[in-house]
Image: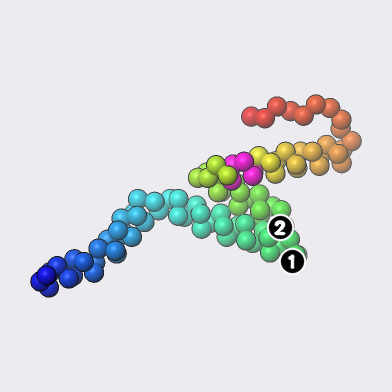
Amino acid sequence: MGPRGVVGWVWFPFRVVIHFIGRSWKRIAVTVAGAALLLAGVAFLVLPGPGLLFIIAGLAVLATEYVWAQRALRYAKDKAQQAKDKVLGKKGEPEPPD
């Protein structure tokens, strides 16, 4: 193996990673932003701040790319609607999901 072969062999993993990032940059950005909002929301549950708001925002961002986040967001919306109805004293049939 000559010098060119060694350089190609050493450079190969970097080329694969660069190709992956170039192909998946949106998903990576959504994951990082959504995870940051979720972590801030969890921290704000014990610190003074709008924890639930940050958690819902993080799930909304993650729901643009991940099905599990869509399900969690739908569950959170349903629970929020139930809490709102309980506070306002509404009794009735729940609205059908979208």
Q: Residue furthest bottom?
A: 3
Whether residue 49 is visible, yes or no, is no
71 magenta-colored: yes
- Look at 86% across and 32% down and name the residue there: 90
Q: CA distance from mark 1 to mark 2?
A: 8 Å
Identify whether 4 is placed above or below 62: below
Residue 40 x/y as whole percent: 64, 61
Whether residue 34 is visible, yes or no, is yes
- Look at 59% across and 41% down and name the residue there: 70
**Is the magenta region chiefly helix, strand or loop?**
helix
Q: Report the side of 83 relative to 18 (left or right).
A: right
Give the quadrant of residue 82. Answer: top right
Sort mark 1 into few (<14), some (14-19) or many (20+) by Cα contacts within 10 Å.
few
Mark 1 lies on a secondary structure that is loop
Q: Mark 1 highlights which residue?
A: 47
Mark 2 lies on a secondary structure that is helix
Q: Mark 2 highlights which residue?
A: 51
Q: Nearer the viewer, residue 44 or 72?
A: 72
Q: Quadrant of the C terminus?
A: top right
Q: Nearer the viewer, residue 86 or 12?
A: 12
- Look at 87% across and 30% down and name the residue there: 91
Identify whether 89 is placed above or below 59: above
Identify whether 79 is placed above or below 35: above
Q: Residue furthest right?
A: 89
Identify whether 95 is placed above or below 83: above
Give the amino acid at mark 2.
Gly
27 magenta-colored: no
What's the coloring here?
rainbow
Q: Which residues are magenta?
A: 69-73
